[in-house]
Image (cartoon, rainbow, N blue to C red):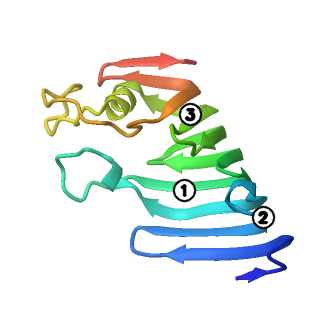
Amino acid sequence: NALGPLDGDIKAEGRITSEIVEARAQGLLRMAGEADIGGSFDFALDRADLGWMRASSAPGERLPVQLTSRVGISGRQFKFETLAANVAGTSLRGKIDLDLAATPRVNGELDADTIDVAALFAGMAGLAPRADAAIWSAEPFTAGWLGGVSGRIAVTAAQARIGPLYNMKTL
């Protein structure tokens, strides 16, 4: 739903529901041309399965995600403020700035309860996970999750796992 003049504030509300995602957004948009799109809205990803993002050898492997954030838009820039998420049981909080320029950039800060360092680095680098639960795969690298994206995301965690035998506190 959208209500308002095309040259002013448009009150917008939307919902998406499918087998793998359920999301909703509500807020104000301003559209004065492609470069002058702006506004802010509350976004909630109530349910999502992002297992398709994993380069996994296990068919049907799930990656459940929930997320809420206040989102600001200015042209091709998106600011996810007060971001709170749960990814496969791990709680995350922080903020992310996304710029969809010719070379996309992502910057931000995330604080996690626990992170699996080996899985995180392997996914970002494009290593496929091993079916036999070994830490690194012998398979060649792919483009990874972040392909041609540049930027910096500072991650802090109360606990970090590095493989099946090593745990660290306050990383």
How far apart, in angstroms, are the residues tagged by discs 1 and 2?
32 Å
Closer to the eye: label 1 or 3: 1
Helix, strand or loop at label 1? It is: strand
Q: Which residue is mark 3?
A: 113
At label 2, the amino acid type is Ala
Q: Which residue is mark 1?
A: 66
Task: Name the image quarter holding residue 62.
Answer: bottom left
**Count of labels in the image:** 3
Residues under numbered marks 1 and 3 in contact, where contact means CB atoms less than 8 Å apart:
no
Helix, strand or loop at label 2? It is: loop
At label 1, the amino acid type is Gln
Task: Name the image quarter holding residue 126.
Answer: top left
Task: Decide: is 28 above or below 134.
Answer: below
- The mark that comes first in sequence, 2 or 3, is 2
Helix, strand or loop at label 3? It is: strand
Instruction: Bin the neighbour count of mark 2 within 10 Å (Cα to Cα): few under 14, some 14-19, many 20 and up.
Output: few
Q: Which residue is mark 2?
A: 32
- The mark that comes first in sequence, 1 or 3, is 1
